Amino acid sequence: GLEPRVTAVGGTFALMGLAALPPGQPPAAALVIAVALMVAGFAASAYALHFLGRSFSIAPTARELITTGPYGLVRHPLYLAEAITTAGMILSHWSWGAIALAITQLALQYRRIHHEENILRAAFPDSYDAYARRVPQLVPGLRPAQAAAA
């Protein structure tokens, strides 16, 4: 449908709006933390993409169910890595406008997760439900909620 595609594109590119915002004045310590978060987020993204391989797409699709590497720790490591990068970007911009963009981007990405899980559950009904029961959605170590048929 149209909404999942718009959500995917919006979630992917929402932070580009930071370029239009005036730069904030974060303290020097905040910049060091921001850079560390962005480097960690980019590295984690590259690692997750390595495992995702050809299954990566902007729009939600179900090519293959990846459950190894970082996908064995959380079901959406790429979105977790992106949230870490986003935190660094917002900290480096240090403004209410940047925070508003981050909230918008994170809300779109969470909606995107919902769409992706519905597609994966439909494409791999038995294996995805078992995977969702054993692996948390976004936060490593959190006990996953029981997979509900959506």
Image (cartoon, grey):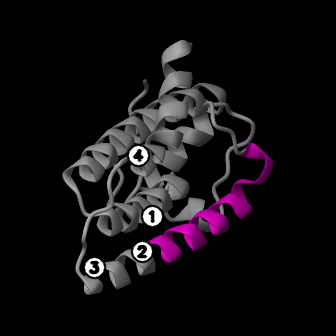
Res 29 → quadrant: bottom left
Residues 122 and 56: in front is 56
Q: Residues within 10 Å of mark 1 (few under 14, many from 20)?
A: many
Which residue matches tag 4?
20
Quarter of the image for the C terminus: give it. top left
Res 55 → quadrant: top right
Please provide the residue range marked out in magenta: 37-55
Q: Amino acid at mark 3?
A: Ala
Q: Amino acid at mark 1?
A: Thr
Q: Establish if 8 lies above or below 81.
A: above
- Asked whether disc 2 touches disc 1, contact meaning CB atoms under 8 Å apart, the reply is yes
Question: Residue sitting at 52 percent across and 76 percent down?
Answer: 39
Which residue matches tag 2?
37
Residues 109 and 126: in front is 109
Picture coordinates of residue 61, whole percent (x, y): 66, 31
Q: Mark 1 and mark 3: span between their CA atoms?
A: 14 Å
